[in-house]
Each structure stands twice: as C-alpha cells, then as structure tokens.
Image (cartoon, rainbow, N blue to C red):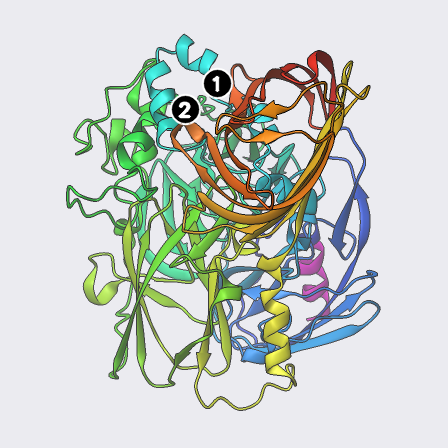
Amino acid sequence: MRALFLYITFMSLCGMVAAQASFNQAPKVVRYDLYVGDTMVNYSGKTKHALAINGAIPGTTMHFTEGDTAEIYVHNTLKEETSIHWHGLILPNQYDGVSYLTTSPVKAGETHLYRFPLVQHGTYWYHSHTMFQEQSGMYGAIVIHKRNETNAKEYTLLLSDWTDMHPHTVNRYLHNANDWFAIKKGSVQSYAEAAKHKHFSTKVTNEWKRMNAMDVSDVYYERFLSNGQSAATAPQFKAGDKVRLRIINGSSSTYFWLHYAGGKISVVANDGADVEPVEVDRLLVGVSETYDVVVTIPENMQYEFMATAEDRTGSTSLWLGEGMKMPAKPLPRLKYFEGMKMMNDMMKMNGDLDTSDGMQMANQQMDMNTVMYPEITGGETAAPMQHDMGNMHMDSTAGDIVTLNYGMLKAPEKTTLPEGPMKVLHFELTGNMNRYVWSIDNKTVSETDKILIKKGENVRIVLYNNTMMRHPMHLHGHFFRVLNGQGEYSPLKTVLDIMPMETDTIEFAATESGDWFFHCHILYHMMSGMGRVFSYENSPPNPEVPHPAMAYRMLKKDDRMLHTMARVGLESTGSDGEIMVANTRYRLSTEWRLGLNDHHGYESESHFGRYIGKMQWLFPYIGWDVRYRKMEESEKNLFGQKNTKDFRQVFHVGLEYTLPMLIVADASVDTDGRLRFQLMRDDVPVTKRLRFSFMVNTDKEYMAGFRYIVTRNFAFSTHYDSDMGLGAGITLSY
C-alpha cells in the first residue's frame, strides 16, 4: 500500500494520472501535506514572483477513494495569511476554506488541519480563497475515485492562465478602465479599425449607447497553461486506447474552448457528477468548471487536445500518444465588430438588455457570440444581426460543428429533491464594464445581509443575466440541479455558467448548516462584489469563526477595496495630471495644471462623491477649487459672471453625468455663486494606440489633444489649451 501511495503521488506531481490499480481497498485516512510558499517562475521570458504549493504550479494532485477521510495539513510559509477552498466538495462547513466566512485564515508561519470525509467521487480542485492568490499559482487538482473502480486509462489536465502583471495591478487597471489589456489583445475596436471593416456606424451606435468596446474576456494573459506548462505530453497512450481526461478549468478569468485532433469528444461527467455520455466536436469549459471526457487514440501518433482561450489570444495543449504530431486546427480570430453590432441590438439606452421580443434563452442553447466565430459564420463578415436573432446559427450543430450546451446533459439517475417546502429566490446579475462593478440586484456582497435558509427546505434560484458578460456562478458546499428540460434526470452541478440575456433555474436541498458562499468564479468579478451568502438558521456555532459579526465585516472588505490611479503629463508649456482613489461607489480625485509662468498660472480641482445607479452614470460631488493666474483684466463666463481675482479659492458642489458618446457633462456652483457647465472626454480611440481628448466649459476654457500609448505607463502627448497654448511632451501613468 505504501508503494502504491508513493507511485500515485509521483505520477500526480508529473501531471500524469494514468490509473494502474483498482480502488477496492477498505476506507482509510489519507494524509497530504501542502506547503504554501513563494517562488519565481519564467513563463514569458521574464522572471516573476509566484505562489506555489509544494514548490510547484499547479500544486500536488491529491488522490482519494470515495469513503476515505481526507487529512490535509496546510503549512503557510508565506509572510501573509492564506486559505484553501476545496472546490466542489461536500464537507462540514468549518472546513470549506473561505477565510472569515467558514474557516479561520491560515496565518503566516502557521499550519492548519482540514479533516473531512469524502462522500463523493469525481474530478474537483482546490485553490486559495484569499485576495488574488489564486491568480499567482495557488491551485491544484483533486481526484476522488469510485470504490471498486476498475482499471482505466486516464489523465488529469488542469488548465490555467498566467499574467506577468501583479494581480492587484490587474484589478486596479480593470477598475480604472485602462485599455492596455485591449491593446495587447488587439481588441481595441478603434474608429479607424471600424471604418476599415465598414462598421463605422456600428462603433458610433456603440458609444451612443454609452458602451465600451466589445470583448469576451477582461484580462490579457501572457500564457495559458496545461498542468503548469505551455504544452503537456502523455506519450504512454497507444492506438485504440480510450482515455478519460479529467479537465479542470483552474483559471482566474479565462474560458477555454476544447477540441481534439483525434476525433469526437465524449462528455461523461461535469463538476464531478456523472452524466449520460454525449458526443460533441467541442465544448467551452467555464471558469472553475470540471469536465470528464473520453477521447480515443486513433493510431500510434501524437494527437493534440487543444484548449483555446475564449478571446482566442492564445492556447495551450495536451499531446496524447507518441509519434508524428497530429495538430488540432487553431480557432481563428474573433470578428469583434460583428459582436459589437450584436451587443448594440441587445442593449437599451438605459444599460439594460432588451428582452422585449419575449425570446426565452436558457442553458447555453443559444450562443449569441456565434456571430463572432468565423469557423461557423464563415467569411470576413457575417450576415446582419436581426433582433429576433433569426440569422444566427444558435443550435448545438451550428455549421456542422456539434457544441456542448447544458441542455444536452442528463444525469444517469434521478436527481429529484426530497419533499419539503420550496423557497424561491430571483437574482438579477448586474454590473457595468465602465467602472468594473459586478453585483447581484445592483448590490455587492458588502451592501447586503446574509440570505437566511432553513434546513429541510428546498431552495430554487432563478437567475437572469442582465450583463454582457458570462458569469460562472458557484455554490459552495452543495450540488444543485440545473432545470434543463431533462425532468427527473436534471444534471447536478456546482457551477452554472450563465450567458448574457439567459434566465436559468437551479435548485438544491438545504441539508447542511452554517454559512455558504454563492459567487461568480471569475476572480475579479467576485472581488468586485458579485456574490451572496446563504446562511442556515439556527446553525450551531462554527469553532473556526468565534466572532461571526466581525468575520463577516472582514469578508465585506473585498469589494470595498480602494483602487488608485495617477497620471502626470510633462509638456513644453508646463505639467498637468490627476490622482484618484476610488472603490465600488465612491471616488476622491484631484486634478492639477501647472504653467511655466504667472500668465499661465496654476490650478487644482478636487472632487469627492458617490456614483448613483446601476450603470453609475450619475456622480454628485462636493469639492474645492484653487486657481491662480496673473490677470490683465477681469474674466467673464458665458453666464455673465465676472472674476477679477488673480487668486481664487472656493468650495463647490456639482453633478457629473455620462451622456451618449461617453461624454461627461459636469455642472457645478461654487461658494462665490459662480456657475460652470463643462463637457469633456479623454479616451476617444482613434486608432489602436492613439487617443483623442477634449474639454470645453462656460468659463470659456477649452482643450483638445492627442495621446499615443507606447507602453502601459508611458505615452507621447500633445494638446492645445486655451490658457497655456500648444504643448507637447510625455504622459506617465500608474
């Protein structure tokens, strides 16, 4: 037994899980030690800091047999706290691993024991649930075999994404609407590109409805990884072998298209739960989902099993077999302007999705992104998008390519819930890309109370996705049924990937106790507030959470995190810049302009306010304004009000509102009674890297300029200012 254990451990560290023994031994306690520590990696030609488990990314693959007891010691060698969540496992609440909500964080230098029975089988994974540690490499696979399982050929494939940028910086860039990621991915969709692709009016309509450019993924990644490598190999498989691939999407924010050079893919399990086998050409695995699929090795050659990022900026592969390489056909670049046109047709002027046609969409059976897939629509330009979507190939066999959707999944046994009262909840997934706020019913986790449920009742959740992004919604500690038309055989899952405009229904039996997290598993969406906490009434005290109220306040700190931004322009006529600190709802900002002489003068204006509404287009504020300029004669604004002072210092109140075309209107009045109205915009995408900005106000001030982005922190700039004249220089940003 000891030799078998060592063999399996060795194979898991190599990323290979070709089972060589049948799992028919008696239940036992299986111990693993996980050492969390700092490491350095080089995935892109640059050496970067990362976090590793047992010195590797991904961490040790842990193997168990159903009925065993897991005994896992997590040793934290970091200088900060950490945590481990056992994704998809049914276990006592105190071991679920969400810091402060269910389990005490593992402090620096401490060891924490997780000990729980394994009451299921299947493919699962584990990851940090502390801040952004998951993005830095803290994840690994869990395989729980059936007892008395027969010998099988299998391989565990953990997919992930890697960015050289620090995850906190990634999060800050997303909240500050920095478009560096779009530049790197080639998805800016500028006016020049729109004209080139004959979609200029599409671009105008897009911005008229106050939307940013179309995209299907938020972050630019340098690499996509298979078991921590750009490509993994499994040469042990031979012609005729049927191999069970245990696929885990351990990425922080990347969906992966899966397809196989050796033929069809047979899907046999999802999120650890068995399903009736269904044969497809490809499938999209959502963030944090797992799929077990069976593929056949046709001949003694190497066949590529390719995982391509949904935005098609890169891919990673597993090569099965040995011999001549048989590559899979790469997926072509997305047709973004077709997607933008689709988005325009779906979106109302108030930011809501348009469901006026009454069309019912559910369970991924109508993939609206199909208009962007050249392999299905063909050609450079797809057929025009109709509001009834009649021109779209929506079914699972679009373009003769059979694509998996949830409607195809069927449980092998009945999954009906036990008798009991039904609690029905309706959730609307909400958010906006402009300020990167993600919520449920326009409230983040920190803005809500826990949702009380009772042991013995059944809970049904009706989810409507009123955003333009997919959201993989994960429920901790429970399997839920997806009501997909399969009746009593509705499949069991722990993650629901819900597409834009979809209404999906899930239900689960409330059989546990304690508090359980329900959240979007795109890491940056979760940290921005898209989640809720289900709390069982009359639960016994959790020994891991001795001060529940204080602990819940700690959990709420995530989406209240402050984000900073700074921009400094150094030009021939002086300097201008801005510093901003903001979170989900509030913003404090200071702008300044320094001239080279008394005639140019200087000024500084600061605002503090709160964003109002779901789309956060309205921003009432208070502030202060300091100005100096040597005046030869009095100034008069468009309202006829005079200013005769060289130096002026006032407080003011005002209101910003985002107009169509993303122009910000700003109306204010100061303590001297002076009124001001201003229109401005500073990010018009002329080309991929060239931005146009302008400002005009009733004080007879105006500005227009261009900025050419060279790197994420450096740009060339030139502008004409009514007070300072023509200037050119550089802009540094943080």
The answer to whether residue 444 is above or below residue 681 is: below
Residue 75 lies, in percent from the top left, at 78, 68
- Please, what is the three-letter code of the amino acid marked with disc 1? Ser
State the CA–CA distance, disc 2 to disc 1.
11 Å
Secondary structure state at the residue bearing disc 1: loop
- Please, what is the three-letter code of the amino acid marked with disc 2? Tyr
- Residue drawn at the location 25% of the way across and 83% of the way down: 421
**Marks 2 and 1, the one that precedes in the sequence:** 1
Q: Residue 132 carries which label?
A: none
Residue 197 lies, in percent from the top left, at 39, 11
Residue closer to the observer: 435 or 529:
435
Residue corresponding to mark 1: 190
| Occupied quadrant, residue 177 | top right
Residue closer to the observer: 51 or 617:
617
Residue 321 lies, in percent from the top left, at 55, 35
Q: Is residue 556 left or right of residue 516?
A: right
- Residue drawn at the location 26% of the way across and 70% of the way down: 414
The answer to whether residue 391 is above or below residue 535 is: above
- Residue drawn at the location 60% of the way across and 59% of the way down: 560
Whether residue 155 is visible to the viewer of this picture, yes or no, is: no
Pointer 1: residues within 10 angstroms few (<14), some, or many (20+)?
Answer: many
Q: Which mark is residue 336?
A: 2
Q: Does the magenta stretch include residue 684?
A: no
Q: Give the range drawn in magenta.
A: 1-10
The answer to whether residue 92 is above or below residue 196 is: below
Q: Quadrant of the C terminus?
A: top right
Secondary structure state at the residue bearing disc 2: helix
Q: In this view, does 101 lie to the left or right of 533?
A: right
